[in-house]
Image: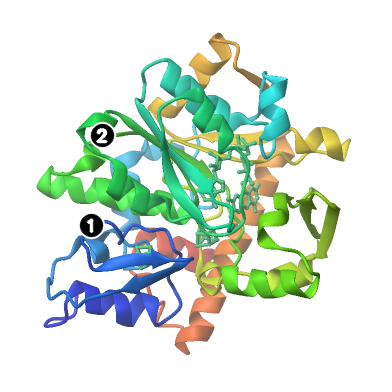
Amino acid sequence: MVKGLSSQKLLKNNVLEENLCTGCGACVGLCPYQVIYHDRTVQLHYCDLTEGKCYAFCPRTPTDFAKLRELLFDVNDLTPEIGAVKAYYLTRATDVSLRDVAQHGGTVTALMELALAEGLIDSAIVSFRNQEFLQNGSMAKDKKTIRKNAGSKFTVSPTIAAFNQLVNQEAGKVGVVATPCQVLALAKMKAQSQKDESGKINQLQLVIGLYCGWALSMEKFSQMLAKYNIKLDAIKRMDIPAGKNILELYTEAGVKEISFDEAQACIREACRYCIDSTAEYADVSVGAARFSGNAEEQRRWNQLIVRTQKGRYLIELAVKRGVLEIREAPAESLQELKKAAAEKKKAALKNIMRKSGSAKNLLYLDRRDAVVQAILEQSR
Ligand SMILES: Cc1cc2nc3c(=O)[nH]c(=O)nc-3n(C[C@H](O)[C@H](O)[C@H](O)COP(=O)(O)OP(=O)(O)OC[C@H]3O[C@@H](n4cnc5c(N)ncnc54)[C@H](O)[C@@H]3O)c2cc1C
Ligand code: SF4
Ligand code: SF4
């Protein structure tokens, strides 16, 4: 940390003004000085604290990735491309009515519902979208609320702000559904709690990570929609179907297909510097299935990485209770995933160097960190 500068000032200089902010919300709700406005993090008042948690938890401040891996995972499970892998499957919820409302196979919602029903957690933090298309984390204490919030919204959700704001004693044991940047913030909170043993992070019992290629900037996305006369509140569902280079927008008037190039122009800048596509610091990570065959069939399945012992217990329980259907994934599927994840890391490094103007300055990444060094090696 630079001597003399407050944590909040460092966050402003190094993250917010550099457009590195992912909108995860980890710096919001810790104090009254920072808030989320639409998908932007805004500092309302000055704070002179030099050891602020806002800076410590932010996924875009220097991180000891090697230490996080050591803290959370079995070293024998670690892979350079996608983090810890205990097992890898294709999965889907057995409940067809859940699959109908979920993004893909409904695995995430099925697992959260099960964790709640079995008392592994007492509350789940999921992402809630309001009529203006604004997203927030929301705390669910029953199956109905978890299910109501199924489906992916491809704009940012400040889910970790909800963790900071809503978790109290009554929340009991908490589970969170989160994108990779949000999962990283939670992992940094866990690492911090090792030092001061304080805080609500000890209530966190389950992290289900979502794969993530990018998120859309609200401003750019709204501008693009205006071009097609589509109102934000008319969008019921969004998807990026396998094998088709399009973003699908489902509205009451039908499905609007947006070309990938046009959708990509709306990506939040911070996502271009992101090295994680599979939520490497979660207990379980879930994404869209990729296998050859019928595209509609594929859309209704997930791929899933089990990363921790807790994750393994949950998946075994889900199979035992009959809420999850599991298939062995084809061998090439894991190889393709690793290849795609490595490509995202390489592209992010390239974008970071381009932004900093130097191969030596990796902005929020510390080139001495073993995990960062591995990416540099792969990029040669
Ligand atoms: C921004 C974003 C980008 C993604 N990119 C990819 C990708 O490139 N490749 C890929 O394979 N998968 C990607 N996914 C994951 C994919 O869309 C599905 O979430 C995943 O396959 C799980 O499907 P499911 O049917 O099990 O989810 P569901 O059972 O429908 O559950 C989805 C859960 O995600 C939560 N959620 C929705 N939107 C957000 C958000 N913005 N932030 C945090 N939580 C949210 C919901 O509240 C719900 O709990 C992305 C997801 C998001 C949110
Ligand atoms: S990335 Fe998250 S923690 Fe960092 S400034 Fe943005 S919202 Fe705050
Ligand atoms: S691409 Fe990375 S930074 Fe952007 S939303 Fe996904 S996990 Fe967060």
Q: Is residue 258 visible?
A: yes
Identify the amino acid type marked 2: Gln
* Residue 118 locus on image (x, y percent): 41, 15
Nearest the viewer among 171 and 296 is 171
Looking at marks 2 and 1 on the same chain, the residue that comes earlier in the sequence is marked by: 1
Identify the amino acid type marked 1: Leu
Name the residue at 47% across, 41% down: 126
Nearest the viewer among 344 and 175 is 175
Give the side of residue 155 with respect to residue 112, left or right.
right
Q: Is residue 328 visible?
A: no
Tell me if the residue at label 2 has its CB under 8 Å from ligand 1. no
Secondary structure type for disc 2: helix
Q: Which residue is mark 2?
A: 203
**Which image quarter is the C terminus in?**
bottom right
Name the residue at 25% across, 34% down: 203
Between tags 2 and 1, which lies in front? 1
Q: Are marks 2 and 1 in contact (CB under 8 Å)?
A: no
Nearest the viewer among 92 and 165 is 165
* Residue 326 locus on image (x, y percent): 65, 21
* Residue 30 locus on image (x, y percent): 23, 57
Label 2 environment density (alpha carbons within 10 Å; few <14, some 14–19, many ≥20): some
Name the residue at 30% across, 74% down: 43
Q: Which mark is on residue 72? A: none
Secondary structure type for disc 1: loop
Color encoding of the figure: rainbow
* The image quarter in which residue 201 lies: top left
Q: Which residue is mark 1?
A: 30
Give the side of residue 340 with respect to residue 230, left or right.
left
Label 1 environment density (alpha carbons within 10 Å; few <14, some 14–19, many ≥20): some
